[in-house]
Amino acid sequence: MCPTGNKKTPTLADVAEAANVSAVTVSRFFRHPEKVSEAARGRIEQAVSELGYAPNAAASALASRRTNIIGLLVPSLTNNVFNDVLSGAFDEVQGTPYSIQIGNYRYRPSEEEALIRTFLHQKPLGLVIAGGNQTPAAAEMLRAADCRIVQIMDTEIDGIDMVLGLSHTEAAEAAVRHLRERGYQRIGFLGARMDPRSQNRLAGYHRAVADLDDPTDSRVFTTPEASSTELGGRLLSDLLAAMPDTDAVFCNNDDLAAGALFECQRRGMRVPDRLAICGFNDLEMMAQTCPPISSVRIFRHEMGRRSVRLMIEAVAGAGVERGLREDLGFEIVERASTRPR
Amino acid sequence: MCPTGNKKTPTLADVAEAANVSAVTVSRFFRHPEKVSEAARGRIEQAVSELGYAPNAAASALASRRTNIIGLLVPSLTNNVFNDVLSGAFDEVQGTPYSIQIGNYRYRPSEEEALIRTFLHQKPLGLVIAGGNQTPAAAEMLRAADCRIVQIMDTEIDGIDMVLGLSHTEAAEAAVRHLRERGYQRIGFLGARMDPRSQNRLAGYHRAVADLDDPTDSRVFTTPEASSTELGGRLLSDLLAAMPDTDAVFCNNDDLAAGALFECQRRGMRVPDRLAICGFNDLEMMAQTCPPISSVRIFRHEMGRRSVRLMIEAVAGAGVERGLREDLGFEIVERASTRPR
DNA sequence: ACCTTAAATGACAGCGTTTTCATAAGTCAA
DNA sequence: TTGACTTATGAAAACGCTGTCATTTAAGGT
């Protein structure tokens, strides 16, 4: 039943002997069951369960020059956005013969490059990578790789193979337009960790406020620092110190937005009466704060799921062609923090 | 430099030839560099970098009957607590030849058992598992496994091999005592997903309020549901409906605590004047809410790091004996939400 | 210079699969 | 009945590495 340690673990050959077939047939039984006769299949099934056999992945990988591992590269493990992606990806491999290997590159292109190299050397089934700003060397490796690549989170990139995500520019633009439609005129932007997706959100902001009368960047406060609730408060303070008449902020993400709300509470500034707030990502908590905070919902869990599904289909030869692009879109979730003036 | 696909990837033998040594020596160069002469080392290093050689993990695993994979089993991928643990674990393998394979058992013992079986079949370097309430079959497999096991998060379990965590009973008891010392008398308990660790926290609560005059369980509100901010608000509403004179709540975790705070804000109940709130875990956000929420800090990141370190040391034969127990403790972080009456 | 001991290296035989490619046994039309 | 296919099965040869053990080389002691 289980690897008890005292007995050596059974091999294909053991199963073959017990089932009175050759090892090749047992191997086929696992890989192409339809090519094994009904009768043999029955005997093999029984032998497998009697012996508690489980295939040796290392041997399989060595012989076939291919692992069943899907590499999943994310820039952070402590960011709620990627947790949901991971969670979706793990949900999707559940029950398949594939497994996921995570790589955390901590927002550092050089670490990403190193991880890509390492992963590729293990001949993975495929690679799912968050984003598209690899180093040139990394991009080259990916292009030359003999496995499929899915880039997720962002559609505004040079795609290497498949791309799955959304337009952060459009999403941010829609959010800021939402603020304008609700009557807000002097809209600030708070941004942390200005990675390419954040840059795009800033671009979207610029697009939406282009025709407003104040100098474009006077209400933009960003930092390369990692995002945090605490930072949200600090950035808001900076913004208010510089431009006290600001009547709304669009935040790069929900941590900042929550931090901004808390800062308002500390200052006794009413939200949205004195300041409207809109976040990005729509984490669960946004609906619960007081007042609840409007945000841009993106489909993180689905993105994880879909990336794995796409990979599996592509590998199964289901005709998922290179160059495929899928936009999962977004949704402006309107809550009290952006109530119309 | 990189696997370009058109050329077959170099093997040990290729490196050996280029460096004018035998394959075994190259293998040794990677595994026990100190056993290879200075001169050979130099030539091998050069050959490796010239050819862009990287060891084939599958072949290595097959030959040595041992992978370099540390399995890490967690009950959730969307819970901040485990994200930090993961993050710590990944930080610690960084730069070592080991890698981490994550398993998500979604708080389901049966999935945990299946994962343990699967992982063990791959002959991992070791297994790091959150918690200690495996099914009997799973526990038996772990006991019989020929690799080291580290159980993390909780010291109040029947340990299989190494144990690393804290006493949730003591931590909760200390938190509730903290509330009492600050002058709160009618202390409630809110709990979600009553897993063994949550049960222990409840036990700690009971210990701390045992001598209070009200019937023990009248202020305890729990649910098997997964924890969320929203749930915190709901549970608090239940509590206040049943026992309106409650003057403090200890929450099972920070999501609930934040939800409780937001509920108070919605109701216009001042915290802590009308109700004190204490959470558990001390997520980053707790310091930022208004008022900031007291919580029990536990060392999640360190737990991830340390578990991997322990595993590596144990495997390296650094005399980490079976039965080792390490208590990482906790820390009551006092904030405005539990200001003395 | 010679013997003893330690350090460095290599030959060889697997590790447990999968991949050909060949063979044996059925199936079907003429 | 026969030849032409199709289907099911096996034999043998990799796959790229490491463990074991024997051998060579260098170092140390007298």
Image (tube, coloured by chain):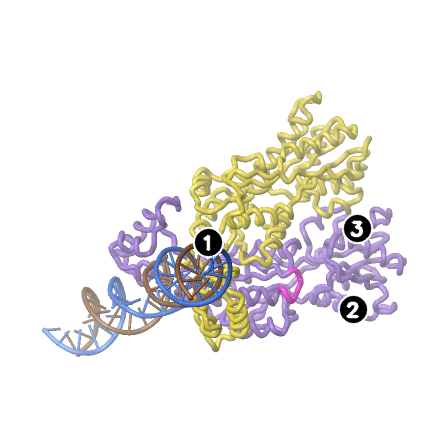
Chain colours: A purple, B yellow, C brown, D blue
The residue to which callout 2 is attached is: A206
Badge 3 and badge 1 both on one subunit: yes
Label 2: which secondary element? helix
**What whole-number distance in Å separates the C-alpha atoms at marks 3 and 2?**
23 Å
The residue at 54%/54% (across/down) is B100
Part of the protein shown in magenta:
A106-111
The residue at 48%/77% (across/down) is B6
The residue to which callout 1 is attached is: A95
- Using the rendered image of the protein, determine whether residue A247 is visible from the camera's viewpoint: yes
Chain for disc number 3: A
**What whole-number distance in Å separates the C-alpha atoms at marks 2 and 1?**
45 Å
Identity, as a three-letter code, of the amino acid under mark 1? Gly
Label 1: which secondary element? loop
Badge 2 and badge 1 both on one subunit: yes
Q: Label for residue A261?
A: 3
Chain for disc number 2: A
Magenta span has A271? no
Identity, as a three-letter code, of the amino acid under mark 2? His
Q: Position of residue B10 (x, y in %)?
A: 47, 72
Label 3: which secondary element? helix
Magenta span has A109? yes
Q: Position of residue B277 (x, y in %)?
A: 74, 36
